[in-house]
Amino acid sequence: MTTESPAKVSEFEHSNLEVLYTAEDISNRVEALGRQITAEYAGKDLVLVGVLKGSCVFLSDLMRSIDLPLEIDFMSVASYKDGTTSSGDIEILKDLTKPIRGKDVIIVEDIIDTGLTLHRLIDILGTRGANSIKVAALLDKPEPRIKKEIVVDFCGFEIPNRFVVGYGLDVAGRFRNLPYVAVIRDPDQL
Ligand code: 5GP
């Protein structure tokens, strides 16, 4: 009996994806952010708080670009949407494992869209006695920000108002494993 392996269908060379930032572009930018954070947080009690699931790839690379002692922790939140837009109400699905009192926190996000989820998260973490709370986001879409102004202290790239996937970002759970960030050419062809 012969066992033939199935034909490989590449996820990384999908014809419906248009690359926006290559793995090299991202790596260069993340290293620059890491150097900036290293310079600003020397002597501080740094905790990186990743917002699951989208930030997992960015956080993994960012933490290895920061040449300081640091801890990591994670939160998972669900945002309630009014139709397609975020309402700003969030439910905490998974909270931090340790207190952040006296710590210097950087919230690590994959992408800031309306900014409402992050604004609410900053409100919640802001009641817990941290010494400081700042934000690192790989991608920022400044255009659709509707209500709340968010300061993204450490921003990878500002992007136009398009739906992107890869490097942690998904559509219906897929494409998080792409080593680059891409735009879906035809959303009807997924
Ligand atoms: P908002 O800032 O509107 O409250 O929500 C931000 C969240 O919406 C992000 O953490 C991400 O999960 C999702 N999101 C916003 N824009 C995009 C996008 O272009 N691609 C993907 N995959 N998710 C997005």
Image (spheres, grey):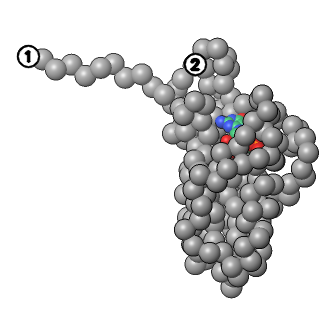
Residue 55 location in percent, x, y?
61, 51
Question: Residue 32: image x %, image y %?
Answer: 70, 61
Q: For the view shown, which residue lies furthest in the bottom direction?
A: 43
Looking at mark 1, is its residue's CB closer than 8 Å to ligand 1? no
Give the residue at x 63% y 63%. 49
Q: In what element is the residue under mark 2?
A: loop
The reply to whether callout 1 and callout 2 are in contact (CB within 8 Å) is no
- Judged from the image, the quadrant occupied by ligand 1 is top right
Front one among 52 and 7:
52
**Sequence-wise first label, 1 or 2:** 1
Q: Which mark is residue 1?
A: 1
Q: Is residue 154 visible?
A: no
Camera-side residue of 50 and 11: 50
Residue marked by disc 2: 190
Query: Residue 172's image quarter?
Result: top right
Q: CA distance from mark 1 to mark 2?
A: 36 Å
Q: Residue at x 52, y 26 (%)?
A: 13
Q: Amino acid at mark 1?
A: Met
Residue 106 percent across, percent down from the top left: 70, 66
| Residue 60 falls left or right of residue 117 | left
Tell me the crowding category of disc 1: few under 14, some 14 to 19, or many 20 or more residues within 10 angstroms, Cα based.
few
Label 2 residue near ligand 1, CB within 8 Å: no
Q: Could you say whether the residue bearing mark 1 is in a helix, strand or loop?
A: loop
Residue 22: image quadrant is top right
The residue under label 2 is which amino acid type? Leu
